[in-house]
Structure formats: structure tokens, C-alpha cells
Image: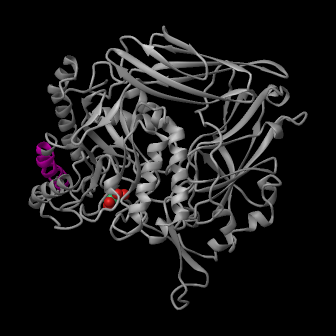
Amino acid sequence: MARTAAVAVAVLGPLLWGCGLALQGGMLYPRESPSRERKELGGLWSFRADFSDSRRQGFEEQWYQRPLRELGPTLDMPVPSSFNDVTQDRWLRGFIGWVWYEREAALPQRWTQDLRTRVVLRIGSAHYYAIVWVNGVHVAEHEGGHLPFEVDISKLVQVGPLESCRITIAINNTLTPNTLPPGTILYKTDTSKYPKGYFVQDTNFDFFNYAGLHRPVLLYTTPTTYIDDITVTTGVDQDNGLVNYQASVQGSARFELAVRLLDAEGQVVAHHTGAQGQLQVPSAHLWWPYLMHSYPAYLYSLEVRLTAQTAAGPVSDFYTLPVGIRTVAVTNSQFLINGKPFYFHGVNKHEDADIRGKGFDWPLLVKDFNLLRWLGANAFRTSHYPYAEEVMQLCDRYGIVVIDESPGVGIVLAESFGNVSLHHHLEVMEELVRRDKNHPAVVMWSVANEPASFLKPAGYYFKTLIAHTKALDPYRPVTYVTNSNYAVDLGAPYVDVICVNSYYSWYHDYGHLEVIPLQLTTQFEQWYSTYQKPIIQSEYGAETIAGFHQDPPLMFTEEYQRRLLEQYHLVLDQKRREYVVGELIWNFADFMTDQSPQRAMGNKKGIFTRQRQPKGAAFILRERYWRIANETKHLPSVVKAQCLGNSLFTL
Ligand code: BDP
């Protein structure tokens, strides 16, 4: 973490503070189609961290102008991955400042010669601030480590015979009071204790600030006149499914759009022409959450076909979007999906694993979804930042309901409630809604986790943020997750659902599990009587080191975690019959944090280890979640039988 170097955020300043890139383009997920190709740029990239005192050597020497290897030593760096844990270098593990990634990409001839082809470079996530050059030309900058950005590079690669291009990406992981999440660089100026220029990155969140190219980087093509964005909202009218769509086109004003909706068997069930319209689906199959229906997660395909006249002749573009027909609504005591009460029984997650840190990894992802289904979990929250788009796609396919959270975690300084921060936060919500609006699995936006919502500016901050998010998407409820006291939470009047985190008999009353029922009951009753809104227990849990055992239970043992859960469940079982609409355990799996005396190699509140092996608590939750699913009476009888027999589920 620390290193004797004057990193000087001030020196990085002009690049870091240039807040506010207007949102451009629709950011449809790059899918192959008869008119679109994609080329993954995963694998080994050249890498160098700028260890110079100013951290500006790379800019001074213009490392983007020539291949990185010609300017000094480089490392092989896998992409996607965090860079922190893949080497043996302790300085790189805790590095703060600019790191440089570079690779050559071979380009198919057609891409460089056919001027009716548009070539786009897309970066799934670069944490935190990124600057991109192609063949030494600056093409993009992006602030924010958890959402994709892209740039049209056609002009740079369609310049005569060219077989490859060099992509250079500089990334800075420094967090400031105005970034999301916020952080502070602390300079340790007492020279009797620290060398000159010593600094550390301070944060107010409980996970390791992994950095690098965390998600796929790829090139894709579209025709020069192309479908730029599609927005779908759905409704239900008796037996009819309603699919409202709106498509936008770039590149030409003279175009026609034809839209078809196909069912899961590939049969056309509705069609329409024009840039917007409503498709009616008689006897529609609704998108139901996992364990709420015998055929959950039913997806239709919306095929959009564009034909346009351009100076170069006719052009066609095709894009297919998965669509789930479902409705979401909130009453003062219920969360409704398709008009039926939905109870969130699930987890909070992190993007976190050995070696790769926050790097996207298919085996890990599929394992996590298999564990969720084994557990009988029907929901998770993307604590504490947006997850990879591929995660959202699997949620759609498996019926796992998502509370989609922004990276607004650790907003506790007064400065982080000011206009600069608010402006950036609004922009991040725009990017998040733009990316995830069409996922049926996403049923609620969470704008923040545990902000200092008792501070005076929090009232205005959350009023503005929530109103803006609702204006972007009137079809989903909005919340933020609080650990404040019900009486002083200045943002609570604006949320649709109260999400409360509490750690009874963990962060206080150590060992006194017997006080949980009283304290939890008081918590729920106070919040409900003040706001009359449905409540989700959005976090609860206990640090547990797998393999530690003690009976009677002591803190950190598997027995303590189990008993603590059971005490919570006593109250949840009463209150879920009233106004509590969900429970999400903290956490799905153990995860890495900064080092501190409170953390033994990371946060150990997982019900699975970091390697995804179950602790005792996983079995308690599994039994509970399947039992609750059974009570909803939607579960098909064959699944019920399996559940009651406690056999293995391979749904
Ligand atoms: C909660 C935070 C979460 C922490 C958790 C904990 O929302 O990020 O990891 O506490 O202390 O308050 O384990």
C-alpha cells in the first residue's frame, strides 16, 4: 500500500477531476449477428506500473507512442484480472497510481478496408480512471471502475493497409473524496515516523481496492448505420404480455426498422415496424424468479432488423435482445413481481476470488450460480458496485432477482455529499441504468450502501439522486442501504423500500446471541412505524473462520455463525408475515479486504469460503430457503418432493 513516493493526487489532478463526460451511445452489449462480429482481446497484455515518485513518468515519456517493451521492462499481465495478486511483488499488490496496459490486436482485412464497417473498442471495466490510445492516438477517457465504455476507432484503423493496431490503456486506481467509491490519500508527514513523501490510500469500505482491466476488452463491428440502443419495458394486461420497445439508430435518418418477438421455441409471437411500438403477446409466458414457477426465467428474443439507405448503398443491421415479460410493484408492505408477493431469500456478493481479484472468470461465475441454486437463493444484491454484464445475463437466464447497486459505498465525508460528487453519482446512475435497464432480473436500483445519511446534506443528496434515477427508469423502485438509525436517516423518506443492515451480537454485545430477537424486533418495528414501507434485512452475519469449532459457541466459530443466523431467523419468520420482504446474508463468500486487526486475511463472513466450499451456515440457509420457497406454493411438486427429501438439486 504505502511506498516512499510523492504520488501527488494534485499532480494527477487535471486528469482525475475532469468530471462529466456526457453519455454517448446506447452501450448495447456486443453480440454477434449477421451484421456484427466480435473479437475478444483477452489473454496476456504487456504491463508496467509507473513507480516514479510523481507517477507521471509514463506521460512525460509518452509510453503510448511506442510499444511499452521498447521503453523499459514489462510484465505479462492476464486480462481480465486484477493486477494486484498475480505477481510476487508486494509493492505492486498495494500500488497506487498509474499502471499501463498494452497489446497488439490483429485486424481482419474486411474491418480495415470496408468503409461501411464501424469498428468499436469496448472496455468492460477499468478500475478506476482510464485513458486509452490506439496507435498512439488518444481516443477515450473514462471515470469509474465498474461500468463499460467504448469508442469508435474506425477512422484510426481504416487508413490504408493495416494488419494490427496497438492499444494502450493507462489506469489510475487512486480514490478521492469525489470518486465512487470515495477515498482519501493520506500523506504521513511526521518524518520521525515515515520517510519523506509517504502516503497511503484511505477508504471507508470493507473490500480490497483491486485494480486493472477487470472485465473483457473487445473489438466489435457494426455497419456505419446501426442500431444504437433499444429500450424495452414490459407490462401485463390480463393474459396478454405487453412489450414496449424504443430503438434508436445512428448513421442515417433514412431507415426502416422491423421488430419480431420470438418465443423460446423460435416461433414468432408478435411483430411490428418503426422505431417504437408495443408488441402484444397473447397467453404470454411471464418471467418468474427461480423457485416461484415451474418454468422460471422465461425469455423471449426481440429481433431488431434495420435497413437503411446510405451514400454507399443499402445497409442492414441486426440485433437480438433477450426479453423477459414481468412487472414489479411495491405496496406499503409488499414487493410484488407479476402481482404476486415476492420474498427475497438470498445473498450479498462481491466480485472476488483468489489470484484474479475482481477479474471476470467464467468457471467462477458458473460455480457461483450453481451454489446459489443449490442454496435455494432467489436473489442477490450487487454489493457494492455494478457487476459484469455477463453476471446480469445469467441472472436473467436462471431467474435470480437482482438489486443492482451503484459504487456509492463509503460516502461518509461531508465533501463527498457536495455538488461535484453528486454530479458524478448522477452520471454513474445514468451509465448503470443505460447498461442494465433491459434485464428482467433487475428489480430495484440501489444508489448507495451505508452512506452517512444522518449528515445534513444527505437529505438533498438522496432526494436528487433518487428522483433522477426514477426519471431515468420509472419502472423500478429505488433504494439505498442504510445502517443509520431510523430517526435520523435523512434519505429514508425518498426510498421505495427500506434496506437495513445490522450486526447484532457481532459489532456489539459480543457473544450475547440472546439479545438478537429483542434488538431485531425493535429495529423492524421502529423503521416500519416511522415510514410504512416494506423492509429488507439487507445484511446480517458473523465473521467465521472455516474449521473453527466451539460449543457452546464462541465468536469466529462455525457454531456461532449458525446460532446467530438462527436468532435472526426467529424474528424474520414473524416479520415476513407482516412487512419484511427479504433477507440477504452477509456474505455469500469470504472476500479480501485491506489489512487490519479486525480482518484475518479478509472478511470471513461468507457462508462459503473464498474457494466456494460451504461452512456449516450454508446448510442452515439451504434448508431455510427451500422451505420458504415451498411456502409460496408456486414450487412445482417434483421440486417440492426433492426439497422435502433434501436430495441434491440439479435444476
Ligand atoms: C457492512 C458493510 C459491508 C461490510 C460489513 C462487515 O456494508 O461492506 O463488509 O459491514 O463489516 O456494514 O462485514
614 displayed left or right of 611: left
The secondary structure that most of the magenta stretch takes on is helix
Residue 212, position as x, y percentages in the image: 59, 53
Residue 506's spot in the image, x, y percent? Answer: 22, 62
Which residue is more in the foreground, 368 or 346? 346
Name the side, left or right, on which 339 lies relative to 398: left
Along the viewing direction, whichever of 24 and 242 lies nearer the viewer: 242
Q: Quadrant of residue 52?
A: bottom right
Q: Is residue 77 visible?
A: yes
Q: Nearer the viewer, residue 494 or 538?
A: 494
Task: Give coordinates of residue 373: x percent, y percent.
Answer: 31, 32
Above or below, 411 relative to 106: below
213 drawn magenta: no
Q: Is residue 564 magenta?
A: yes
Quarter of the render that holds ligand 1: bottom left
Q: Residue at the location (68% across, 63% down)?
A: 15
Identify the residue at horizontal 26%, vertical 26% (top origin): 292
The boundaries of the magenta stretch are 560-574
The quadrant where residue 217 appears: top right
Give residue 215's position: percent from left, percent from top: 56, 43
Residue 592 seen in render: no
Furthest-bottom residue in this view: 192
Residue ranking furthest to the top = 267
Please give left or right for residue 161 compared with residue 142 in the image.
right
